[in-house]
Amino acid sequence: MTETNKEVRVRFAPSPTGYLHVGGLRTALFNYLFARKMGGKFILRIEDTDQKRSIPGAVEKLMSTLKTMGIDYDEGPDVGGPFGPYIQSERKDVYLRYVNRLIEAGAAYYCFCDEERLDKLRKAQRKRKEPTMYDGACRDLPEGEVRRRLEDGEPYVIRLRYPREGRTVFDDVVRRKVAVDNSQVDDQVLIKSDGFPTYHLANVVDDHLMGITHVIRGEEWLSSVPKHIFLYRSLGWELPVFVHLPLLLNKDRSKLSKRQGDVAVERYLERGYLPEALLNFIALLGWHPPDDREVFTLDQLIEEFSLDRINRAGAVFDVDKLNWMNGWYIRNFDVEDIAERARPFYEDAGIDVSDREKFVKVIAVARDYVSSLDEIVDRGRMFYEELDFSDEQRALMAEEDSKAIYARWIDELSKKSEWSRADSDRLIKETMAELGLKGKQYYFPLRLALFGNTHGPDIPTLVDILGVDETLRRLRRAFDMS
Ligand code: GLU
């Protein structure tokens, strides 16, 4: 894939918005997998040059989410590295240095147009159904005039002097050959009137200075590539390899949006999606393994990952599949581990789960039908809380046969303090024969008394989870029901 023998260096370059978008996680993951696979470096760089949009605490939150997800970076704001600082707002001077070189080379120019003029221009273009682009009014101002206006302290921005003729053709690992008519490309603002660089300038300068070999990011940035290439060339720099990941789509194939569901990784974590399951699911959004396997650990993903298995077609973010996968992980991970992860959900619901042995047994049962950990509380709370019965259920418990079952169990259990599953099995057999009851007639009232539902886990399991004392208490309550 890489023609050179250079060490692979890739980066995740988010703008801190206060949460990590699932698309951002996909970009981070693919960069991470590629770096690990190639024995290269993975860098986190914060692109916060849009000061209007910066949110306090957003960077810390982003770093902590990446850590929770198990995506570790080799260089970044908190871990440092040889090419820091890794936060763009701390690198302002760097960009100014390079923009001056661009001006000297004729690849950028000062523009004094004010917002009012630009606004009018855009409106007129929209009316004519033309793309909204700068019309180049300041592109060829005489040098003397520019100097004078700068000396007068007139506000200005610096724009890219993008060629108007010809086409830009470039290679992308996923999209193959891409060609863009230069007339379609705007004279992009590089330095804003507040002195901050725009994304385009800062991104290219940093990718170069940080030695980035492969730019792996979402397809929405594909249209920016011509501007970036022009910047690389004007500064005499080597191009990185471009890899644009396919769009993420809703089930109806529209672009993935907040309106149709959660897009914040933090929201999924809060609701008890396991980082391992999320990563596995995200890895398959736009990438496919050589076989039809679906379940991968992070190490297996690193092993299998390659850029040439990235798809071109948009990838549907199918929440049903995510639910299935998360449920699979919840059921297949070590039960003690799942209990530990489920603990905060029970505690938040005000349930005391300090009896660890009991809790692990509860989880072994409660995890059976859930697709996320926030659902696991309702499937286990009946082992801790007083059961509530409907009138219909009460009527069943008040039947003579039911009372006979309860009486026999109370009798046997109260003689013992130790009770095994084998004891339950034996007593079931004995009392069924003795009372002449079969299947449902026997199990429904008993399960109802212990579990609050006629359907659910088998009786030996219920007795095992509840323990002798609580089983007796529940049976006595049922026996007294009228
Ligand atoms: N800061 C851009 C973003 O928020 C980075 C795009 C890129 O990777 O070049 O997605």
Image (tube, rainbow, N blue to C red):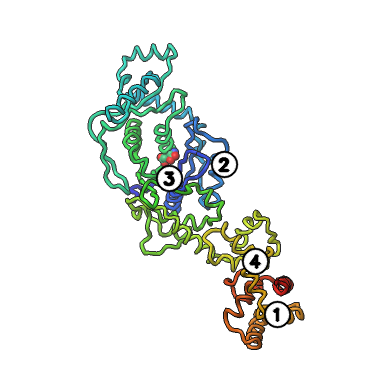
Mark 1–mark 4 contact, CB under 8 Å? no
Would residue 54 appear left or right of 100 to someone viewing this image? right
171 on left or right of 374: left
Q: Is residue 133 above or below residue 362?
A: above
The structure residue drawn at horizontal position 49% and vertical position 30%, both measured from the top left corner, is: 52
Q: Secondary structure at mark 3?
A: loop
Say which amino acid is labelled 2.
Glu
Mark 3 sits on what residue?
A: 257
Q: Disc 3 marks which amino acid? A: Ser
Q: Whole-Å distance between the Cαs marked 4 and 3?
A: 42 Å
Q: Earlier in the sequence, mark 1 or mark 3?
A: 3
Kindly report which numbered mark, 4 or 3, lies closer to the viewer in this rendering: 4
Determine which residue is flagged by label 1: 409
User: Three-letter amino acid code at disc 1?
Assistant: Trp
- Which residue matches tag 4? 389
Find out whether the residues at labels 1 and 3 contact each other: C-beta distance under 8 Å. Answer: no
User: Between residues 39 and 174, which one lies in front from this camera angle?
Assistant: 174
Whether residues under marks 1 and 2 lie with C-beta atoms below 8 angstroms apart, the answer is no
Nearest the viewer among 452 and 343 is 452
Mark drawn on residue 60: 2
Q: Residue at x 37, y 64 (%)?
A: 292
Dot 4 falls on a residue whose secondary structure is loop
Closer to the camera: disc 1 or disc 3?
A: 1
Q: Is residue 192 visible?
A: yes
* Residue furthest out toward the left: 166
Labels 1 and 4: the sequence-earlier one = 4
Q: CA distance from mark 3 to mark 2?
A: 24 Å
Upstream in sequence: badge 1 or badge 2: 2
Figure label count: 4
